[in-house]
Image: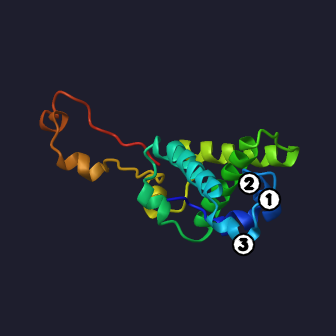
């Protein structure tokens, strides 16, 4: 299931351009027929597959987590899907990307890479908690209660001292 709909990509990019890119004839697809166009659906599905391939390989996210995103994280996922789908449509026609489109693709690719590596994260509670280190250390009381060899044979070892913090 794609992470973005045809309505989402039409908000991101000019629908007239999309209608020309999905057409297999020499005329643009009618705007009313754009929502059900199989070429557009295919591009959105493949873009979602690219995102899954990038994010699932790191083991940080699952498909269920990606589909359950809400708010700003969901909007970002939709935007990345739309950009990748639009690029697929442009390349499907054999055309090149404009400078602005190439910059948008580079930004999306960089963002996916940062998400895959865990540098950036979607705001899932488990993901946020995984990035928070939990420091555990032994307190002097815990060490004294452990009755280590040094404590049981205090005649052979010097007295333990603790650094002042």
Disc 1 + disc 3, Cβ < 8 Å: no
Above-or-below relation of 28 to 137 = below
Q: Earlier in the sequence, mark 2 or mark 1?
A: 2
Q: Position of residue 140 (x, y in %)?
A: 30, 49
Label of residue 23 in the image: 2
Q: Position of residue 73 (x, y in %)?
A: 59, 64
Label 2 packing within 10 angstroms: few (<14), some (14-19), many (20+): some
Q: Nearer the viewer, residue 92 or 97?
A: 92
In screen coordinates, is 80 left or right of 91? left
Q: Residue at x 72, y 52 (%)?
A: 86
The secondary structure type at the circle numbered 3 is: helix
In screen coordinates, is 117 left or right of 134? right
Label of residue 132 in the image: none
Q: Is residue 32 visible?
A: yes
Q: Earlier in the sequence, mark 3 or mark 2?
A: 2
Above-or-below relation of 138 to 74 = above
The secondary structure type at the circle numbered 1 is: loop
Coloration of the structure image = rainbow
Residue tagged 1 = 28
Disc 2 + disc 1, Cβ < 8 Å: yes
Residue tagged 3 = 32
């Amino acid at each position: 299931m794609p992470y973005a709909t045809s309505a989402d990509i039409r908000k991101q990019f000019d629908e007239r351009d999309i209608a020309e890119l999905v057409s297999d004839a020499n005329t643009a697809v009618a705007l009313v027929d754009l929502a059900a166009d199989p070429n557009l659906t295919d591009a959105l599905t493949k873009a979602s597959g690219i995102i899954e391939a990038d994010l699932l390989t790191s083991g940080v996210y699952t498909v269920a987590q990606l589909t359950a995103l809400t708010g700003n994280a969901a909007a970002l996922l939709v935007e990345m899907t739309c950009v990748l789908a639009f690029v697929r449509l442009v390349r499907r026609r054999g055309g090149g990307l404009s400078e602005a489109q190439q910059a948008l693709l580079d930004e999306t690719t960089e963002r996916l890479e940062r998400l895959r590596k865990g540098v950036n994260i979607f705001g899932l509670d488990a993901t946020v908690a995984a990035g928070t280190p939990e420091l555990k250390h032994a307190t002097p009381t815990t060490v004294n209660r452990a009755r280590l060899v040094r404590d049981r044979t205090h005649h052979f070892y010097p007295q333990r001292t603790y650094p002042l913090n």
